[in-house]
Image: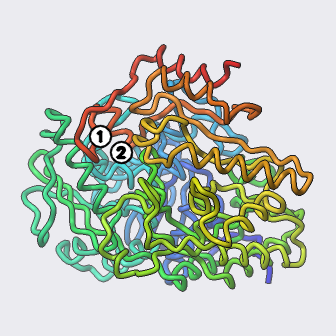
Amino acid sequence: MTYRTECSIPTSVKEVERLGWDWIDIIFFTGDAFVDHPSFGTACIARYLEKAGYRVAVVPQPNWRDDLRDFRKLGRPRLYFALNSGAMDSMVNHYTAAKRLRHDDAYTPEGKFGQRPDRAVTVYSKILKQLWPDVPVVIGGVEASLRRFTHYDYWDNRLMPSILVDSGADWLCYGMGERTMLELTRAIEAGRNLRQIENLPQIGFYRKGKSAAKDPIILHSYEECCQDKVAFAENFHHIEIQANMMHARTLVEPVGQGYVQVNPPCPPATTEEMDACWDLPFTKLPHPRYKGKRIPAYDMIKDSIITHRGCFGGCNFCTIAAHQGKFIQSRSERSILEEVRKLAAMPEFHGNISDLGAPTANMYGLHGKNQDLCAKCRRQSCLFPKPCPNMDRSHERVLKLYRAVDAVKGIRHSYIGSGVRYDLFLDEKGFVDETGKPYLRELMLKHTSGRLKVAPEHTEDKVLNYMGKPSFKLFERLRKEFDKINRENGTHTELVPYFISSHPGCKLEDMKRLAANPCLKGIWMEQVQDFMPTPMTTSSVMFYSGIDPRTMKPVFVERDPMKKKAQKALFFKK
């Protein structure tokens, strides 16, 4: 079986007519070009709904600056409009940490910039509500998901209310939304009343009056947060705890004359549910409308394989767990190997899988030994401040997967381009079990294309504590084992560490100590970035409030642009 070359998801009037449709159930609007690949959320949801029997169309990168013909061209959907900003928050897509405008957009044909607006979800939603006021609008994706509550907006340097308030959307589906979107679609189609729909998991909505939710956590209002930074930090503490629990409670945040209600997420997807998503008939190609044009983001992932979702690392500056969840949801080996075989059969494939992984590649198949304990856990991270003793850190299953993939006919190499958590197989004394050394050895010798990238993020324990990252002593141990494997095998694989400057809690003196750390001697320091506060992270709450929401204690924050620049410049001083 090979991937199809045609795409059954239409993007234009002519394509709808070619299918013989006289109505469309759901019309998607997205800030990205439409790529029919499981790495792109719009394609995942569209294919999932299509499999359930719904007629779905996608309008990619609609023009919001003309007479709005892109928003009119497919007419009124039978059920609702769905929209997202694309695979990234539109503000992160547009601006650097220094708030400078970027010059290209990897999710647009030929990398052309300017094909989506700032705050795309809000702009698209307002337009659709203006044109079709009686048609429900459902927002989702990263931008909507991470702005579902009061949040700090770095680019406007102020607190903003839930995106539901500004956008005027009817419903918000947060996180990885296939299952929720299908339930919501069925509810709208069945004509269920608002109260029934409001009980669905993993959705949010804004209403006037008071919430009728059972036993919710009532957060401080948006107005209170604007007046009191402590209130904002306290809100986030509750939000973060519930986001990381197996059995969460409903959260209600008053705003104006009403409230935003966000229901608990769906249970983590089972292996069968994960497989069902990846077994959908993706072409794994950009839509035919882009023939002859290059989409940079597609070039990066076209030869990749996603093995799982979620991350239990709990880094304070990262949004992965907030969007994908803390609990690892893995595909079966059968599903992954079937995708590998299909990829190997594609005429454009040259034998090298660019990335066999996920947010953290070596979390595949990992879970708590006692799931009953996991069901009660309130920890943000299973690894910080110390690894949870209930976590099974064996790399046996992921090693078997790597070997099975490499045995598929047509596969020359399978590289791990995703991040790897070395604190899953190392501690300060050495490897944590008998699978640790074989994993690192095989990762270096068979699955690294010259450079192994890891993310210690800093060298100073005080700063690492604010980041939610382990001690730098683990990186020192990693380098020792890394160099040893290189010597034993006569190889020259490089170790490339990622670092962050100007994170809350980090001063210029900390950066000087980082730059002088002897363990970094001989390492090329190219993977560096200045901290950028993004919505719904502990670190962004620290940046705005000057308070660590975990302890409610003050934290130093460097906000002066010149001093931030000086911190980053130390990376490059010899």
- Indicate left or right for 230 with 303 as reference: left
Callout 1, which amino acid? Asp
Q: Nearer the viewer, mark 2 or mark 1?
A: 1
Image quadrant occupied by the C terminus: top right
Question: Which element carries disc 1, helix, strand or loop?
Answer: strand
> Residue at label 1?
548
* Cα–Cα gap, marks 2 and 1: 8 Å
Colour scheme used in the picture?
rainbow
Q: Is residue 360 above or below residue 571?
A: below
Could you tell me which residue is drawn at 14 percent across and 46 percent down?
221
Q: Secondary structure at mark 2?
A: helix
Pointer 2: residues within 10 angstroms few (<14), some, or many (20+)?
Answer: many
Which residue is the site of mark 2? 538
Badge 2 or badge 1: first in the primary sequence = 2
From this viewpoint, is residue 122 visible? no
Q: Are marks 2 and 1 in contact (CB under 8 Å)?
A: yes
Residue 325 location, x and y as percent? Answer: 43, 64
